[in-house]
Image (cartoon, rainbow, N blue to C red):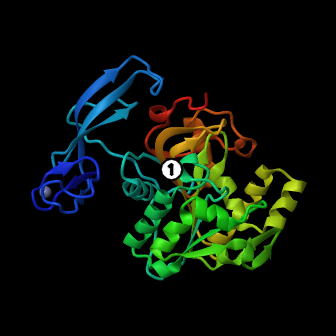
Amino acid sequence: MFYQCPKCKRVWQYPLAKCPECFLGLERMKSEKIKVSGVSKVNIPTILHPKTPYFVLLLEDENGNKWVQKSVKEYKIGEEFKTEKSDSKDAVAVWRVKYDILEGIEKLVELIGGLKVSPETKILILPTLVSPKHSYFAENTSPEFLGTTIDYLIKRGAKIENIKVAGQSFDEIPIEACAKKSGLLDICLKNKVQVLDLSKSNFAKKDNFEISEEVFSADLLINLPILKVGKASASENLFRQLKKENYLGLKYLSSEKEIIENLLKFLLARQSESKGGPPILTLAEAQNVQKRDKFVAYLGLVFGSFNSLNLDRVFAEITMTKLPEILKNVKIEEIPILGRKVEELQYEINE
Ligand SMILES: [Zn+2]
C-alpha cells in the first residue's frame, strides 16, 4: 500500500497523517498489478530469518511504486507476482502489517473469499477481553485493532447501530474493569458502538451448550482475538459466547479440546442449515504477541479465517511452539495457507 498527496502527488510508503508540504490528508493507492523487477538470493541465516536460502524480491506495481518482499519461491525478473486466493472455509490467510492495519484486514478478507456486509447486517464482535491491563501487555485485543475493524466494517457498508462489541468475565474481575483499562471501552464510546456484557444476556440451551442469544440474533460474528504464543487463543475466545457456569461445568467433565470441537461442530451445522447461526469470521491480531514468559515480542502479523482451529494451528507453526492440547488433531498439511508462506515468517519466538 502506498499513500499519495492529492495535490503535489508525492508518494509515501507509510500513512502520514498529512502531506508535510500541502497539509492535506493522503489518499491510499492500491497496487493491482505487481511484477518482479529484481531478485536476490540470501544464503546466510539470521535470527529473524533462520531458514535459507530465501529470496528478496524487488516488486513494482502499475504506478511505478517499488518495495521489497521476502519469498521462499524463486521468481524471474519481469514475472507477474500474484497472491493466491481461496473460497475454502478452512483456508487461513496471513499478512504482514507494518503501519496500516486496515490494509491488513482488507487483504485477509479478500484472500479468504470476501465477506457480505450490508447496512442491515447485524454484527457481533468478540474481542479478547480477559484482563484489566493496558494494551502494551498484549493481554487483550488492542484498541487499534478493534477500532480499525469497526472502520473496515463501516467502509464496507455496515451501519454503526448494527455493530455490537461483546465480552464477559469468566473469573472474579468485572468485565467493566477489563474494558476500561484495555482501552476497548474508549474505542466503543468514540465510535458510538454498543457494548454488551454477555453474562447479562439471555442464553439458549442447544445440545450441551448454553449460548448467548445475542449470537443467534447476529448475521455475522467476528471473533477478534489477540494471539499468544503456545495457546489456541482464537478458538479459546469463542468460549466467551457460552454461559460461564455452562463453560465451567463442561470443562469439569471434559477437555477444552472436546468442548471446542463440539461447539464448532454445532455452530457450523447451524450455519450450513441456515437455522440462524451466523458465519464466524476470525480476524486475529499478532503484531505484538505475548510469549509464555509474558514478555511481549514483535511479530507484525495478522491472520484471517472462517476456521479458528486452523488459524491457531498456522500461528503455532509460524511461532514454532509445542502444540497445545486443543490443536493436537489439526493437521497443518491439510490447511490451505494464503498470503504469506509459513517458511517466510517462521522463527522461534519463544526463548
Ligand atoms: Zn502535497
Circle 1 — which element?
A: strand
Residue 270's spot in the image, x, y percent?
68, 71
Residue at the disc numbered 1: 303
Q: Residue at x 59, y 38 (%)?
A: 333
Q: Nearer the viewer, residue 64 or 89?
A: 64
Figure check: 267 above or below 343: below
Q: Residue furthest left?
A: 8
* Mark 1 neighbour class, 10 Å CA radius: few under 14, some 14 to 19, many 20 or more: many
Residue 233's spot in the image, x, y percent?
64, 50
Residue 344's spot in the image, x, y percent?
44, 33
Amino acid at dot 1: Phe
Q: Is residue 224 left or right of residue 28?
A: right
Instruction: Say which quarter of the image contains residue 216.
Output: bottom right
Instruction: Say which quarter of the image contains residue 153.
Output: bottom left
Is residue 319 visible in the rendered structure shown here?
A: yes
Residue 217's spot in the image, x, y percent?
63, 80
Q: Nearer the viewer, residue 266 or 186?
A: 186
Image quadrant of ligand 1? Answer: bottom left
Q: Residue at x 76, y 76 (%)?
A: 203
Q: Residue at x 54, y 36 (%)?
A: 318
